[in-house]
Image (cartoon, rainbow, N blue to C red):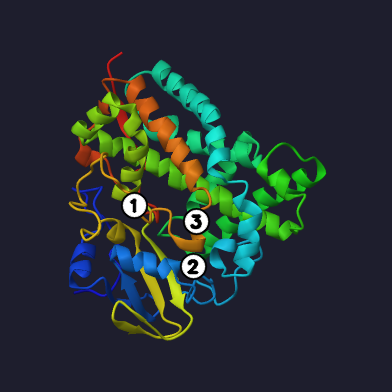
Amino acid sequence: MARTLPTERAAARPFDPPPGLAERRAESPLSRLDYPDGHTGWLVTGHALAREVLADPRFSARAELRHLPIPGAPASDQPAAPGMFGSMDAPGHTRYRRLLAGRFTVRRMRRLTERIQAIADECLTAMAERGSPADLVPALAQPLPAQTICELLGVPYADRDRFQRHALTLFRLDNTPEQTGAALAAVHEVVSELVAAKRKAPTDDLLSDLTTSDLTDTELVNIGFTLLAAGLDTSTNMLALGVFALLEHPGQLALLRADPRLADQAVEELLRYLSIIPFTVRTALEDLELGGRRVTAGESVTISVPAANHDPAHYPAPETLDIRRRSSGHIAFGHGIHQCLGQQLARVQLRVALPAVLNRFPSLRLAVPAEDIAVRGDMLIHGVHQLPLAWED
């Protein structure tokens, strides 16, 4: 059995994890993994073991220690830049996390529901006026999270295209190092201009709030970049792929339309079922035992998010989409101290937008055969570039 990380999803089964992961998990939830840079580490495919690693402080998220499991992924032997808290351990991570956590509470995110509903309604009205067929990606899936995160952080909406274009380049799997470097520099230029503007004239937004802290400009730029990059492409693809999945499972779609109270469960099940983030990586800080195997200090451990979220030991019939399932415990947003800060914002957007588009167009269907909708094999985050939809007026 190959010891590299399976990443490509089967064209005929776009919602299932990449082929090969289930076989690896059946053999062992912890197995050896060969990394493109020559490192030999580990692959976690079991749900319980994934949560164990992500909650254990003996496994580090530090950028300078980790090896990445896909060819061409940017690697560094340098510590994360100030503000890039996702690639840090305590105490640096703790400091940034505390500054931000109070601004991403469940209560605060839910207060955004009314605004998100208004944005969704505007997008869907414009989509209806243009008429059938329409591509959901530019009509709703891209503008809704873009406008939401831009308003939350105080980014002028007119600047979103410039940022989004360069940010998307960073998620491409076929970049040259020069392309990645140029996109990174362009994104930082956009956010640097924004931070400078907030310093001079603060407004009522999260980034302006942070200018009153002791953060340096460099820290603010890197935090702004992290939050913007994390909140755009992920939400876009969860929304588009979520609609695609429901249209391909008409029984589940009918359940959701018949009982709006299932919206929360539907969102959690779609997060588990689709698992659009392919992996996360930790590195052992000391020799330790994991899953009955000896892991040596310095070895990187890749956690396969789709494999863990489709572990039959935790989720019976995991390849079945069932919005009545209690999908708690999934790791779509990670687990432990690095669990995604913006997870509640993502949930609110999905809770609002999925029922909105399905109810606005009762006859909604795919405008092309399902097999003609190509998944994004050229991008790190799973999704679709286009989702053509049709309906009767």
Residue 67 in sight in this render = no
Q: Reply above or below: 187 against 136.
A: below
Residue 28, image x and y in percent?
22, 73
Q: Which mark is residue 275?
A: 1
Residue 54, image x and y in percent?
43, 66
At x 80%, y 40%, the residue is 201
| Helix, strand or loop at mark 1 | loop
Q: Amino acid at mark 1?
A: Ser
Residue 379 in sight in this render = yes
Whichever of labels 3 and 2 marks the residue nearer the N terminus, that label is 2
Q: Amino acid at mark 3?
A: Leu
Q: Reply above or below: 258 against 307.
A: above
Whichever of labels 1 and 2 marks the residue nearer the N terminus, that label is 2
How many other residues sit within 10 Å of disc 3, few (<14), some (14-19) or many (≥20)? many
Q: Is residue 227 left or right of residue 276?
A: right
At x 26%, y 35%, the residue is 246
How many angstroms separate mark 1 from mark 3 (CA)? 20 Å
Residue 140, image x and y in percent?
43, 31
Residue where numbered disc 2 is placed: 74
At x 47%, y 37%, the residue is 348
How many other residues sit within 10 Å of disc 1, few (<14), some (14-19) or many (≥20)? many
Residue where numbered disc 3 is placed: 170
Label 1 with label 2: CB-CB less than 8 Å: no
